Image (cartoon, rainbow, N blue to C red):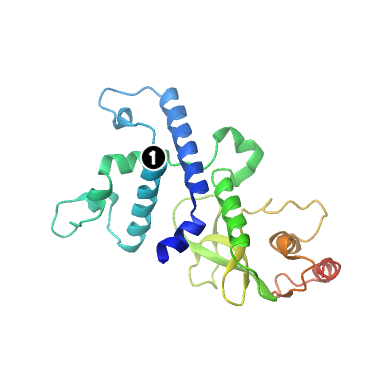
Amino acid sequence: TPVDYYSEFLNNDIVRMMVVETNRNASNVLREIRLNRSSRLKKWYPTNENEMKKFIGLLIWMGLAHYPRITDYWSKNILYKNAVAGQVMSRNRFQLMLRFWHFNDNNFAERDGRLYKILPLVTKLNEIFFNKKTASQSLVVDETMIPFRGRLLMRQYIPNKTHKYGVKVFKLCDKSGYTFHSKIYMGKGTVNNANNDLASTSVVMEVMNNHFHKGHILFVDNYYTSVQLAKNLLVRE
């Protein structure tokens, strides 16, 4: 069923990580700021795995049912009234969850770099992507855009893409379209280039790391193509 597939990828391990880091973040924030008597933050209490699953479910549903504002999902106005949001959790609780939602310990910011806030999530998802499907012989490396027009250090503008503004992601896929590995573009420092390779070569070598010596045929466009990449791949079959 769709729920079974969903649970395979957003599994209990990932949900548990979100719970731990969200509670940690809330505790740190509330300890460091002075709250006035009427502050909604005073109503925070630790979340758990069951509530986190409900929260994520609401986020997915909101991505399908677009309302002008978050508060409209709980509105009693006939234009917005629905039988979903209010039955899952209250508006105030949802906004508190959204305020503290976290995937990593802030103490690791320097160690994990620009992507530290979501690095554990991306790492776990890549492990799951690799383990859930056997890759076909033909693989392709290309980039895609996650649409986003807000303020973000990693936001890119690529005029020839359908979505011109957003976050650029390098992906390794097979002919079915399944993604085996994804890497978010962060500008300078996107790859750990210890061998002084071209940046494009380093991206390919990183996303292909679990697929060497297996006889795959790799397709790339002219952005990635180089003699250096050909030599690197040749010795790794």
Assign the C terminus to one quadrant of the image: bottom right
Could you say whether the residue bearing mark 1 is in a helix, strand or loop?
Answer: helix
Depicted 134 relative to depicted 113: above or below? below
Quadrant for residue 168, please give it: bottom right
Quadrant for residue 60, please give it: bottom left
Q: Identify which residue is drawn at 48% across, 37% down.
A: 20
Assign the N terminus to one quadrant of the image: bottom left
Kind of residue at disc 1: Arg
- Residue marked by disc 1: 99
Give percent across and percent down for residue 26: 43, 32
Residue 117 appears anywhere in the view: yes
| Label 1: few (<14), some (14–19) or many (≥20) C-alpha neighbours in 10 Å | few
Depicted 202 relative to depicted 70: above or below? below
Depicted 55 relative to depicted 230: above or below? above
Give the tally of numbered discs. 1
Give percent across and percent down for residue 114: 60, 45
Q: Identify which residue is drawn at 20% across, 57% down.
A: 82
Left or right side of 65 for 141? right
Query: Residue 68 or 89: which is nearer the viewer?
Result: 89
